[in-house]
Amino acid sequence: MPFKRILFLIFIFVFFPASWTWATVSTLQESHGKWTLLVDGKPYFVKGVTFGIAYTQKNIDLYMDQLVHLGCNTVRTWGVGADTQMLMDSAQRHGIKVMLGLWLRHGKAGMEGDDAFDWVNDTAGREAQWTDTLEAVRKYKDDPALLMWGVGNEVILNIGTEKAKIAYAKFLEKLCLAIKKIDPNHLIASASAWTVDAAYWAKYDPAIDVYGLNVYGAGAAVVDKAVEKLGVDKPYLLTEFGAQGEWEVPKDSNGLPIEPSDQEKYSTIATGWTKWVENKPTCLGGFVFNFGNGWDHGAVWLSLMMKDYKRPMYWATLKAFTGKSPAVKPVMITQYEIQKNSAKPGDWVPISVATSGPSSGLQVSMYFNDRTGVREHRDAIFPLKIKGNLSSGIDFQVPKILGVLKIYVFISDEQKNLAIAQKSFVVTDGSGKVLTAAKKSGVLPLVVYDDDPRITGVEEPFVASGMMGNYDSLTLDLGSTDHPEDGQTCLKVSYNAYVGWVGCAWQTPANNWGTMPGGYNLTGAKTLSFWARGTTGEEKVSFGYGMIDSNAKYYDSSKKGTGDFYLTRHWKKYTIDLSGQNMSNIITGFYFFTSSNGVPVTFYLDDIEYN
């Protein structure tokens, strides 16, 4: 052996520990229309899960052990945090790769959260995201567990105006190029709901290597054709995959989305993976949604686990990735009916339920969800009082909340498998109305806006989601520091058009025009007050609450406005008297209208609240 070669080997042995590993390199290979993901030159098909579970140093390895058992080789995250290195280290120990998410902010409230960012005008906010993202890239680029970057998730879907969508897409391209300069060894993906974002990537973002598509249900069978129509010659990953979600299923006779049964959820993953994912030449694999263990509405619908109970989707993932079934057949609910469609609070209502699988050691509980109010409340599931058992029959007591509810039955077996079925149910006062399907406000005052929620950390009860008129020219800055009336920030409204009108409504839940249960019971409120000022004193505006008429299934119990008037250049408090108003169900907590007469309009709001 040459002397120089011997010296080199001695140098490696002395200066690098035995446990040291090289960072991986991910690349793409295309041959006759077939795309292959390569890791260090070897083919790699992603059999992954989205990793949405709360973990600690104590339990992270236990979760990774479970993923290895399921046949999982990759996990996907949405962002980085203080515990990311813990995740990366455990993944590396278990031979699992990570698609590391780099979160970019959404422009409006939506399914992903209640944030609102101005991609057109917030220069400081863009710079902060740029800096934070590239700092994360520098930190993790050489980590041996890193497979690729996932830059942004459903961002364009959650941006209101076309101008802002384009501004974001151009920012994303510059960011991806900067990432490639820092880390040329790992591919870059971004994630879209269906192909909504992908249409913009095709035009503005050639630096994206892999299209990440969040697709649920049988849509996975045809998403490759949808990508082809964009004229894109790039591969894709199913960055989220599972049963159909709440946003895309039909509604039942009571107006609630029809949740797929456990059997359908199992089949979508177990057989859909083989039929819709593995056999597509442009598909690099995917991520089953979601390896989580929450205890809420979303976990019931899509999580592989709830607390330490395994859902049918857990075993479906095992079947999809390994072809194996659980050693012991888990409990499944084969039939569930509520014997009445409606009842009054406090009534006892019988159900009928049947199961397959084990017949002994079964535990039964029931919960409800009312899908109203702020995100925390509408996602929560609340326990119901029950009596009886599976053999003699079960009754549940109707809770003291009016409206359309989702009633769940939970059945677990001795192996800690959990089967769930659900039906909608109407709690009525006898009138047949669903008007009062509202979450009580709690303690007044109820704040609509008093400071940037990103600073306060407090989720606001109503969401500024109801855009009207020429809203492509509307910008809302929730965190303006331009001389707020109170606190650190105020709300800046900019209508950047020379003609026409625009409006915005604060709704609960977001985008509720009377098609969804929601609203707040504000009985006892005496006034709706707010502070406002203009920039010139020529701003013609009107404000109010309540916009949804009683011809809608869900509607505002009252409505009242200021009518048109002109703002002053200085902060002034305005008050709407609520005396004599029915405040039992307010879906539209606040709104404004303004118009332009040859000059763009800018005005400010602060301290909007019910007292």
Image (cartoon, rainbow, N blue to C red):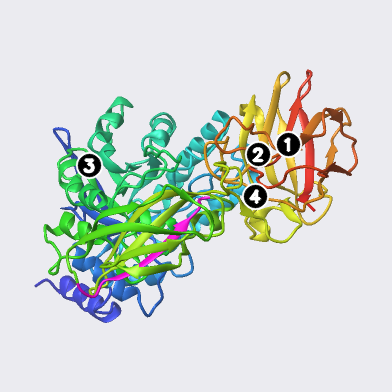
Left or right of residue 472: residue 367: left
Q: Indicate whether 332 appears above or below 171.
A: below
Left or right of residue 352: residue 499: right
**Is residue 279 shown to the viewer in this render?**
yes
Residue marked by disc 2:
556
Q: Closer to the camera, 400 or 161? A: 400
Q: CA distance from mark 4 to mark 3?
A: 45 Å
Q: CA distance from mark 1 to mark 4?
A: 13 Å
Q: Secondary structure at mark 1?
A: loop
Q: Secondary structure at mark 2?
A: loop
Q: Secondary structure at mark 3?
A: strand
Numbered range of the magenta stretch:
360-371
Q: Nearer the viewer, mark 4 or mark 3?
A: 4
Residue marked by disc 4:
520
Name the amino acid, label 1. Answer: Lys
Q: Residue at x 61, y 28 (%)?
A: 472
- Neighbour class for label 2 at 10 Å: few (<14), some, many (≥20)? many
In the rendered image, residue 255 lying in the magenta stretch gets the answer: no
Q: Quadrant of residue 586?
A: top right
Name the amino acid, label 3. Answer: Cys
Q: Specify which label sits upstream in the sequence, 2 or 4.
A: 4
Q: CA distance from mark 1 to mark 2?
A: 7 Å
How far across and how far down the image is residue 146, in percent?
32, 60
Residue marked by disc 1:
559
Q: Specify which label sits upstream in the sequence, 1 or 3.
A: 3
Residue marked by disc 3:
283
Q: Closer to the camera, 428 or 168? A: 428
Q: CA distance from mark 1 to mark 3?
A: 51 Å
Q: Residue at x 79, y 31 (%)?
A: 542
Q: Nearer the viewer, mark 3 or mark 2?
A: 2
Name the amino acid, label 2. Answer: Asp
How far across and how far down the image is residue 112, in percent?
48, 49
